[in-house]
Image (spheres, rainbow, N blue to C red):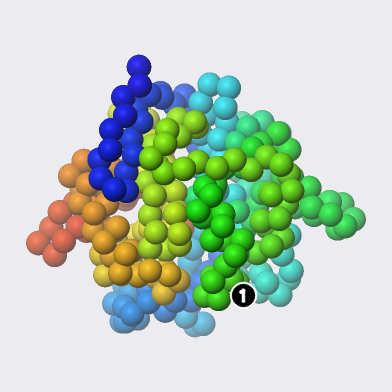
Amino acid sequence: MLLSSQVNKNYYIAFFTVFVNLYPIHAGNFKLDGGAMFGVVPKSIWQRSNPADKDNLIDLCARCLLIENGSRLILVDTGMGDKQSERFFSYYRPWGNHNLIDSIKQAGFHPNDITDVFLTHLHFDHCGGCFAWNKDRTAFVPVFPNADYWSNQSHWDWATKPNPREKASFLKNNLKPIEDSGRLIFIEKETINPLGFDLLFVDGHTEKQMLPMIDFKGEKVIFMGDLIPTVGHIPVPYVMGYDVRPLISLEEKASFLKIAADNNYLLFMEHDAHSPLVRVQHTEKGVRLKSRHEWKEIF
């Protein structure tokens, strides 16, 4: 049975799928400048939740999600990948031993098993793992040769004709192989997602970022992407300097956090290196962190 309803201008809900299983996939760790990650928030405040190293860099990760649903195996985001230059990676200080392919194999699957790659948005740290160099580094080859790639028309146009502020985040060697594959598919707002999960469209960080909202084992799991990248970003005014429309980010966060606190949602933190899942609650100071959880603790 299909039941659809419009909750507000950002949410389009289609309740019709029961997912077989979810698997957190760790595509790697990196670091970014804490000041850029917290915008106008002073370091004396944000360093309490996100301590910086001597170079003012904070720990981040690329935590993706694998959704097993009948005949489909859907990977949400792919991390940075490894095809960029040594100089490029020197800016982001990779750390730890996690990588996308090993994590997928540890979940019991092979890259060839992935049927769909759902991209929340096309910044390099979310889509860089879709393609890799071939053995002699003369061409790019798909990491997931049997997969379709899912975006939306508005965001694709935004990414392929980037504004000066985001140009460095939309890399041609990430986007062109997806386009040339002939397997790029668009999902549009206010239409039913063929992949079977609900979507939240948000425009503050970038145009038409899409965040999966998944009903699983009695929980509503929300893939946070860059709406709330780390636990330290839960307070509404704590908005990244990377957001292209920070005032819209404020509105989107406030609206979402109220609903998340009201309904005790589980927030799947894509970029928080130390808190995979969190819940939020209402307080006198606004919505704040309620609890942190490991995946195995809940599921």
Residue at the (56%, 57%) spot, across then down: 157
User: Is 214 rendered above or below residue 179?
Assistant: above
- Disc 1 crowd rating (10 Å Cα; few below 14, some 14-19, many 20+) is few
User: Is 259 rendered above or below residue 39?
Assistant: above
Task: Quickly name the residue at label 1.
Answer: 91
Residue 172 in sight here? yes
Q: How many marks?
A: 1
Work out which residue is located at the far top of the displayed protein and give it: 1
Residue 274 in sight here? no
Give left or right: position of 246 versus 181: left
For the C terminus, give its image quadrant: top left
Quarter of the view holding residue 197: top left
Work out which residue is located at the far right of the displayed protein and give it: 136
For the N terminus, give its image quadrant: top left
Residue at the (73%, 52%) spot, across then down: 177
Give left or right: position of 29 versus 13: right
Q: Tag 1's secondary structure?
A: loop
Percent x, y for residue 70? 53, 21
Residue 128 vs residue 27, the one in the foreground: 128
What amino acid type should be assigned to the residue bearing mark 1? Answer: Tyr
Quarter of the view holding residue 143: top right
Percent x, y for residue 226? 43, 59
Residue at the (42%, 69%) spot, across then down: 243
Work out which residue is located at the far left of the displayed protein and give it: 284
Percent x, y for residue 71? 58, 22
Residue at the (54%, 71%) spot, across then down: 163
Percent x, y for residue 275? 39, 54
Give left or right: position of 114 versus 233: right
